[in-house]
Image (cartoon, rainbow, N blue to C red):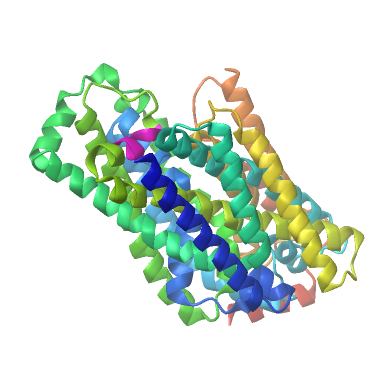
Amino acid sequence: MDYISLVVFSLYFIFMLLVGYLAYKKSNNFSDYVLGGRELGPVVGGISTGASDMSGWLLLAFPGAVYATGLSGGLWMAIGLTIGFYLNWKYVGNKVRKYTIVSGDAQTLPEFLANRTRDTSKVIKIVSALFIIGFFTFYVSSGLVAGGLLFEQTFGISYTFGILLIAAVVMIYTSTGGFFAVTWTDFVQGIIMLVAVILVPVVTIFAMGGWNDVISGVDQVSSNQLNAFSGITQLGIISALFWGILGYFGQPHVILRFMAFNSAKDITLGRAVYTSWNVIAMYGAVLIGVVGLAFFGNNRLDNPESVFIQLTHALFHPIIASILLVALLAAVMSTVSTQLLVSATSLTEDIYKGLFRKNAKEKEMFWIIRGSILLIIAFATVVGLDPNSSVLDLVGYAWAGFGAAFGPPLLFSLFWKDTTKNGVLAGIITGGVTVILWSSLTERGVIPFELYELIPGFLFSSLAIVIFSKVGSAPTVDMRREFEMAKK
């Protein structure tokens, strides 16, 4: 098994590096490198966005949460995510694409927010970039943790070595090929992931004798074997639901894909592709947790987040198992590469060029962004080296940070013509800081109840935008004219 897996994984790594090289040949300028020349099509765009969005948590943390806590917690989260991604694609996707073009052809989310509010001080760019880099460090770390767990349980090799290997391969093909490499690899990885979330639960159900036997197996699991969500509270349901309903709007890696689409029609078609992929993927992941609960029964796994890996080892021929485990590797690498590119682009465009080198040449920008990729993945690797790190905890913290810091500023910028620089800046800072403080105070018991930090962060950010947009100068005539142009 180890030898076969090693061969399959090696071939997969070689393929990713080859795609990076081919993408390097296609990137003619810096705009191609960071946005693919805004030529993203609906099928590749829809599937690649899903793959980059879901990450290793789809095959590790999500099934693990269902396995550890029972169906209710994971199901509420899946429902919230379904609502959230549909609303984001329906009402935000095309508006972001159009408005970023109208507003100075912005190539990053911080650049758009600065252009939209006519912030010549560059403070919005800098503050936004710092939050993006900070929270993406945790998001990238979640992927590396998933990869380290995969290598440890598949080959019995060091968790640390697995993290370092994945970090090195992703860094090479991302820094070499940029947006084209990230998108094409995410597309392939998305298809592999979809096959895995369908095949693993279906085979498990047949192996156990049918769906009725799965239900019977779940019923036989002692209730005291399940954790908190088996008796999910109202706050637990609210937290699980609003993870997706509020969180999607502020994710920079999703916004980047919207900006890169070729046309409004392609976004509409891409939404259909993405919705189909995402629904199958999410509810397939929930089903993996359910069938894992039945299959292993009261013989509980030490690490619930390994349920997908353990089912694959137990039920499939070594060659098939190796290919399915590549799906987990694909989930990890697709998200890490996208997040690396987004955060490195923000560091390069919004801080280096925006603050220090306004007239930087393209060749210089290429070197800076590649150095930024190396710097960010190095920090993320350090964070992920703790073997006790939880994929779901890391993803949840970063997701909340982005959703609270950027969701309200983006929505108000797109839909409220009276949004100003003061409002956007206050919203970003209030949302991001609330997530950090709420999480810390909850861990210390100062806040005596558990509510997902995204919810208060999103609420306080929205209030700050409304209040501070009324302080200082009103939107200029030019800003209002641009707002109306983006509506057409």
Can you say which quadrant of the picture contains the C terminus?
bottom right
Left or right for 422, reference 244? right
Rendered view: 445 above or below 453: above
Q: Which residue is depicted at the point 23% across and 28% down?
A: 296
Q: Quadrant of residue 69?
A: top left
Q: Quadrant of residue 162?
A: top right
Rendered view: 102 above or below 302: below
Which residue is at the front of the view, 317 or 439? 317
Q: Which residue is depicted at the point 70% across and 74% down?
A: 31
Which residue is at the front of the view, 169 or 451? 169
Q: Quadrant of residue 229?
A: top left
Task: From the top left corner, tell me how far across and down residue 468 is, in percent.
Answer: 75, 51
Q: How many marks?
A: 0
Rendered view: 383 above or below 241: above
Left or right for 330, reference 253? left
Residue 423 in sight in this render: no
Q: Where does the magenta region start and end?
A: 305-310
Left or right for 487, reference 42? right
Q: Which residue is depicted at the point 19% across and 49% down?
A: 202
Task: From the top left corner, tell me how far across and down residue 16 is, in percent.
Answer: 53, 61
Which residue is at the front of the view, 414 or 28? 28
**Does the segment drawn in magenta span residue 309?**
yes
